[in-house]
Image: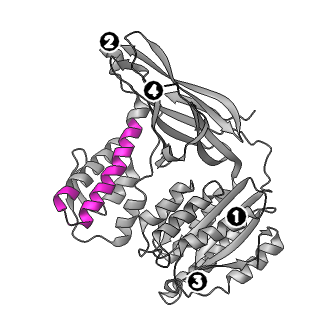
Amino acid sequence: MSSFTADVFQNEYLPAGTEVVDAVVTVNAGDAVAGSSSNSGSVEVIVIDTSGSMSEDRGAKIAAARTATKAAVDVIRDGVEFAVVGGNEGAYMIYPNEGLAISTPETRADAKKYVGRVQAKGGTAIGTWLRAAAYLVKSTPTELAHCLLLTDGKNQHESDEVLSSAINACVGLFQCDTRGLGTDWQVAELRRVSAALLGTCDIIPEPHEMEAEFTRLTEAAMGKQVSSVALRMWTPKGSTVDFVKQVSPDLQDLTASAQSVNPLTNDYPLGAWAEGEERDYHVQIRIPVGDVGDERLAARVMLAIDGVDEPAALVRAVWTDDERLSTRINREVAHYTGQAELADAIADGLAARDTGDSHEATIKLGRAVQLAHEAGHSDTVKLLKKVVDVEDPATGTVRLKRQVAKTDEMALDVRSTRTIRVKKAQ
């Protein structure tokens, strides 16, 4: 038995006639991997954009990519299989010549020599890069596989259909953190990759910031020790799952990832976990309406650890005509509902701003400021203040800035899905 735990937070009391049940499930890895410090059986693939645009800024971008990749290689633990892949309109091996190398002091030193020779030329075909990573991961039996993918541009040399097909081919093979350098890449494009592959997406505004980010991401990957975790959810006959969303540490809709276990049970893959890691999930279930006084089980939430069920927690529904009970707002559900509204307000506000609809952009971004202020989400407030002038955060009174740096706009966009956890009750 692992020491993973799951706790459910909800208001189980429903008004008469209500069929929707909401709950937040907090999953904690505990010391699930105590005594397992080896990363043997793990794979790390670093994919760096080496297209012609990386030679811009007098070669500063490709030079920084070389430095950052060397730093990432340095923190790959002994025994981990790894590779460095270069990406342009194709994909090619930087190190080793083929397949995967086993990390040792000697292979890491060798890899850094080859990385130091990388030059920038050619185009951009992100789907091809992903397929190269998938080929490498499939070449070896592995429990944990991670890919770090960097680009500074748009996916210009293959169709959107090719990219989608490549993403689908990688699902379940590895997790992928994507990073965009500068401002010539597309947030939606990289977010598609990271969301499908259970990773993160972010901007690296300047080349010199790349080394620290590569090091941090690779160290985090080395800390993952439990490979296959799923939220296994049973719901009674006649019920439907409206959604399953990760709501902390960031927002990810997992609904479409459902894998059928039996007619009443689905698995929602959660990716790899590190010891002590904690995440929150918002589930919404639609169940047949009961009579006042009826009590039903809306869902049985389990954790599937490497395919083995572990009992976790129950989501309940009790119908009542007592308004004092049915109108209680569960603080966890309310908090994360607000966080989702915040992300939507930012996305809608930026979209309106891009189309020149200043009125709508002001309303939406003002609402975002208000929500971020109420939640105490200071990081998001800081990002918003680079796009709007805030007159009153409590009411969401703002004015659009006339001049906004592209990096600030993209940072707000890509980081809009980051959340803060609900404060613990005193």
Q: Compare residues 319 and 180 and report the one nearer the observer.
A: 319
Are there few (<14), some (14-19), or many (20+) residues within 10 Å of tag 3? many
- The image quadrant that residue 231 belongs to is top right
- In terms of secondary structure, what is the magenta stretch mainly? helix
Q: How far, Cα to Cα, is label 2 from label 3?
A: 67 Å
On the image, numbered disc 3 is attached to which residue? Answer: 63
Disc with the residue nearer the chain's start (3 vs 4): 4
Q: How far, Cα to Cα, is label 3 from label 4?
A: 51 Å
Are there few (<14), some (14-19), or many (20+) residues within 10 Å of tag 4? many
Disc with the residue nearer the chain's start (2 vs 1): 1
- Residue 321 got which mark? 2
Q: Amino acid at mark 2?
A: Asp
Where is residue 9? Give x, y as percent: 48, 28
Would you say residue 339 sits in the magenta stretch? Answer: yes
On the image, numbered disc 4 is attached to which residue? Answer: 10
Q: Say what secondary structure mark 2 lies in.
A: loop
